[in-house]
Structure formats: structure tokens, C-alpha cells
Image (cartoon, helix red, strand yellow):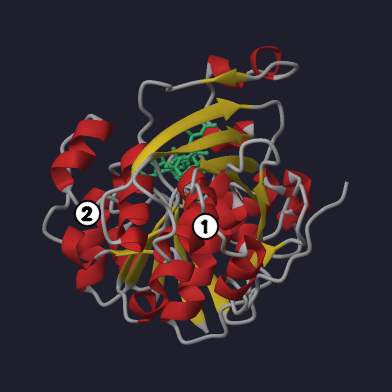
């Protein structure tokens, strides 16, 4: 059994990790940390876990974490910077759900995250945990940077076009909508029912911290720099990301449906839907699936790709477990075969 520690067990991605891991046949939950809920039984705080775990929250303790086989960080940015190095020294592997190790250029990271990069020494060995792009590297990794939620939906949507060099020079567009759980469990005015429901708004139009992460991944796929306008919106739903992606390729004759189906034919967590489909976020709610549909706009010929994920599953905790499975030589889908909740 894989002994698992989770730092940040009370947050939304932390409890989602718990929901997935209590039914994972190869994982044994060993440590779950929270500074604010120390001593509280996990199942008292999250009754959906009653009967699944007897663990109590404990404060982060480097020795206890180092005794695990793998430690997940489901914490705000900067926490993994301060703890991951020591945990790795003990031979324990680290899977970080925050953005601490996602951007390879530490100066760029500091610019977007507004704080010093606290772990430049181990950054080079971090592997970007998007299995559809980095599967072989993930298998041998000790330190994984789990992609962000918006970056997962956008990269999976654009990859087939960029990998095949089908797009001429242009600025791509990613128009994205997120559920409110994307902002985490911490209290904030923007997440209040009266602020977030019955309304829809864009934010961070000038530049969102996921922009450099997405451009980095698209650049790897294309083999060159990729221009991107990325606009996130907050929508009145709890879970889900809906990405509408735009690209122009005048004169391109390729059968895009066939291209996408071939690219993702062997991917267990990417579903290319039949031509003409409009995937809904609820078709992936609670599941680790990304559903994609590729269209050509009738009047303009513009390529429009629709990509939906659950931000807490394929956008965070499910993808983190997918990485764990690969790192420990398990079938990639182990413990991740949840069917989405409908309606
Ligand atoms: N929500 C989402 O959809 C996604 C989130 N992420 C990323 O995952 C990470 C967690 O997100 P989310 O679950 O939403 O966050 P939450 O704000 O919901 O939870 C944060 C957790 O971290 C713990 N924590 C906070 N500060 C520290 C600290 N200094 N040391 C140790 N533990 C700490 C908190 O517990 P306590 O304070 O009691 O210790 C809490 O359990 C973030 O980096 C986020 O950006 C990634 C993809 C999607
Ligand atoms: C709705 C909302 O606020 N979303 C968050 C992003 C979601 C997230 O958790 O970002 P990471 O994947 O980088 O951790 C935001 O815009 O900052």
C-alpha cells in the first residue's frame, strides 16, 4: 500500500483528494494536516467521509510527512516551497497542487505571484503533471507540479492543433468560465452567495496568473512561443470549468474531428465528443474526465474548441491522483473511474 500524507486537508482540493483516496485500492491515508482544525476527526468535519476514515487532522510535522511514501500539498502558494525540499530528502515523493513548481522560470513566477520563489534549488527537477503531455517524465518523477484548473482545460483543448503545427502565427483566444469552488474555501466577499449567484463576470482581464503557465505548456506543444489572450469569468455554479477556445487557420483542409479523435484515442481521461456536440460542465461533475468538442464556425470558418472539466477533479485532485498512479507504476485510472453526476 502507498502511505499517503495530505498537507491542507480541510480545503476544497484537500477534501476532494480524501473523497478519491478513501476508495483507492492501493492508497492508505496516513497523515492529514490542518492547523486550524488540529485534533478534529476528519469525518466530523466532512460527514461524507464517515465510515471511510478514522483519522484526525494534525498540524504539519516534517517527520510524520517524511514517513509517507507520497505527500500531496493542497495548500496556498508558497507552502510547498518551504516544506517540499526536506520531504524529498527523506525519499518521499511530492505532488503539489499549488502553483509553486508549475512555471519553470522562477523570475517569471515571482512576477505573477508577487512573492519570492522559495525553492529555486529543486525547481529544475519538478515535472509538470499533465499526463497527456508529460506521461513518461511523470513516471520517473519525485516532484510533480499539478497543472492549474484553467490551464488543464485550455491546454487539452489546443494541444492537437499546436502539436501538428496547424495554426499560422496568431494570438489564440481562451474564453473561460469557472465555478466558485475554484476560489477555494477561504472566506472572501466575492464568494458570497449574494455576490456570486445570479450573475456572471469576467476578472483579471489585464492578465491572470495562469496566463504564463498556459503559454508555457502551449509553447512546449508547438515548439515555439504561442500568443494567447486568456479571459477568466466567475459563473454561478459550484464546480466546473468551461473553456471556449478560438483559433484561425484559413485554408486548412484537415479533418479536425479525426485529428482530435486520433490524438486522444488512448487517453483514458479525454473524451472527444461526436462532431457538433456541446459538452456541458455537468457531464464531467465529480469525474476526472475532460470532454472536448471541435467545431468550425459556419460563417467565418473559425476553429472553435469546447473543453470542459471539473476544476476540483481533472483540474486538481483527480489529476493529482492520476499522477500518483503513474509515479507508482499503477494503472493510470486506478481509483478514478467516477461517473459524473447528472443532473
Ligand atoms: N479550488 C480549485 O479549484 C483549485 C485549487 N488549486 C490549488 O490548490 C491549492 C489548494 O486550493 P483549495 O483547496 O482551493 O484551497 P483552500 O483555501 O480551500 O484550502 C487551503 C488548505 O491549506 C491549509 N493551509 C493554509 N495555509 C497553510 C500553511 N501555511 N501551512 C499548511 N497548511 C496551510 C488550510 O488549512 P489550515 O489553514 O487549517 O492549515 C486548508 O486546508 C491552492 O494552491 C489552489 O490554488 C488548484 C487547482 C484547482
Ligand atoms: C474562480 C477562481 O477564483 N479561480 C482561481 C483559479 C483556480 C485555482 O485554484 O488556481 P490554481 O489552479 O492555480 O491553484 C483564480 O482565478 O485565481
Q: Residue furthest front?
A: 251
Which of the two residues, 199 or 166, is positioned nearer the viewer here?
166
Is the residue marked by circle 2 packed among few (<14), some (14-19), or many (20+) residues within 10 Å?
some
Q: Which mark is residue 104?
A: 2
- Looking at the picture, how far across and down is residue 15, in whole percent? 60, 51
**Mark identifier at residue 93:** none
Q: Helix, strand or loop at disc 2?
A: loop
Check the image and report above or below for 45 versus 18. Answer: above
At a point 58% along the width and 42% down the height, the residue shown is 302
Packing grade of label 1 (10 A; few <14, some 14-19, many >=20) is many
Q: How many marks?
A: 2
The answer to which of marks 2 and 1 sits earlier in the sequence is 2
Name the residue: 45% across, 52% down. 58
Instruction: Where is residue 168? Give x, y as percent.
Output: 38, 49
- Residue at left offset 44%, top offset 63%: 130
Q: Is residue 160 left or right of residue 340?
A: left
From the image, tell me which residue sits under label 1.
156
Q: Which numbered mark, 2 or 1, is in the foreground of this view?
A: 1
**Viewer-closest of 200 and 188:** 200
Estimate the spatial distance between the alpha carbons at disc 2 and disc 1, rounded to whole Å: 19 Å
Residue 265 quadrant: bottom right
Regarding residue 32, the answer to whether it shows in the image is: no
Work out whether residue 306 can be spotted. Answer: yes
> Where is residue 48 drawn, in percent x and y?
75, 52
Q: How far from the left and from the top, in percent, is residue 177?
A: 60, 33
Amino acid at each position: 500500500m502507498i502511505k499517503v500524507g495530505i498537507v491542507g486537508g480541510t480545503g476544497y482540493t484537500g477534501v476532494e483528494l480524501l473523497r478519491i483516496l478513501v476508495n483507492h485500492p492501493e492508497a492508505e491515508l496516513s497523515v492529514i494536516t490542518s492547523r486550524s482544525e488540529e485534533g478534529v476527526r476528519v469525518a466530523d468535519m466532512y460527514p461524507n467521509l464517515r465510515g471511510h476514515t478514522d483519522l484526525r487532522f494534525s498540524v504539519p510535522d516534517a517527520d510524520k510527512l517524511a514517513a509517507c511514501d507520497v505527500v500531496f500539498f493542497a495548500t496556498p502558494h508558497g507552502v510547498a516551497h518551504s516544506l517540499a525540499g526536506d520531504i524529498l530528502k527523506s525519499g518521499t515523493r511530492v505532488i503539489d497542487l499549488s502553483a509553486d513548481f508549475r512555471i519553470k522560470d522562477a523570475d517569471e513566477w515571482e512576477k505573477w505571484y508577487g512573492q519570492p520563489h522559495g525553492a529555486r534549488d529543486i525547481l529544475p527537477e519538478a515535472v509538470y503533471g499533465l499526463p497527456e503531455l508529460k506521461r513518461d517524465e511523470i513516471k520517473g518523477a519525485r516532484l510533480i507540479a499539478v497543472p492549474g484548473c484553467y490551464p488543464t482545460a485550455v491546454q487539452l483543448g489546443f494541444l492537437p492543433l499546436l502539436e501538428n503545427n496547424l495554426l499560422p502565427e496568431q494570438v489564440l483566444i481562451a474564453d473561460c468560465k469557472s465555478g466558485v469552488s475554484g476560489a477555494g474555501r477561504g472566506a472572501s466577499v466575492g464568494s458570497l452567495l449574494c455576490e456570486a449567484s445570479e450573475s456572471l463576470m469576467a476578472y483579471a482581464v489585464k492578465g491572470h496568473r495562469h496566463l504564463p503557465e498556459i503559454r508555457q505548456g502551449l509553447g512546449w506543444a508547438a515548439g515555439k512561443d504561442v500568443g494567447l489572450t486568456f479571459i477568466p469569468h466567475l459563473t454561478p455554479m459550484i464546480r466546473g470549468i468551461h473553456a471556449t477556445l478560438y483559433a484561425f487557420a484559413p485554408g486548412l483542409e484537415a479533418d479536425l474531428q479525426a485529428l482530435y479523435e486520433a490524438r486522444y484515442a488512448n487517453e483514458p481521461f479525454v473524451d472527444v465528443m461526436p462532431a457538433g456536440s456541446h459538452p456541458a460542465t455537468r457531464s464531467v461533475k465529480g469525474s476526472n474526465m475532460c470532454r472536448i468538442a471541435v467545431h468550425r464556425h459556419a460563417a467565418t470558418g473559425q476553429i472553435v474548441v469546447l473543453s470542459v472539466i471539473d476544476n476540483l477533479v481533472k483540474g486538481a485532485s483527480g489529476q493529482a491522483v492520476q499522477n500518483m498512479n503513474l509515479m507508482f507504476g499503477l494503472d493510470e485510472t486506478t481509483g478514478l473511474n467516477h461517473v459524473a453526476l447528472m443532473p
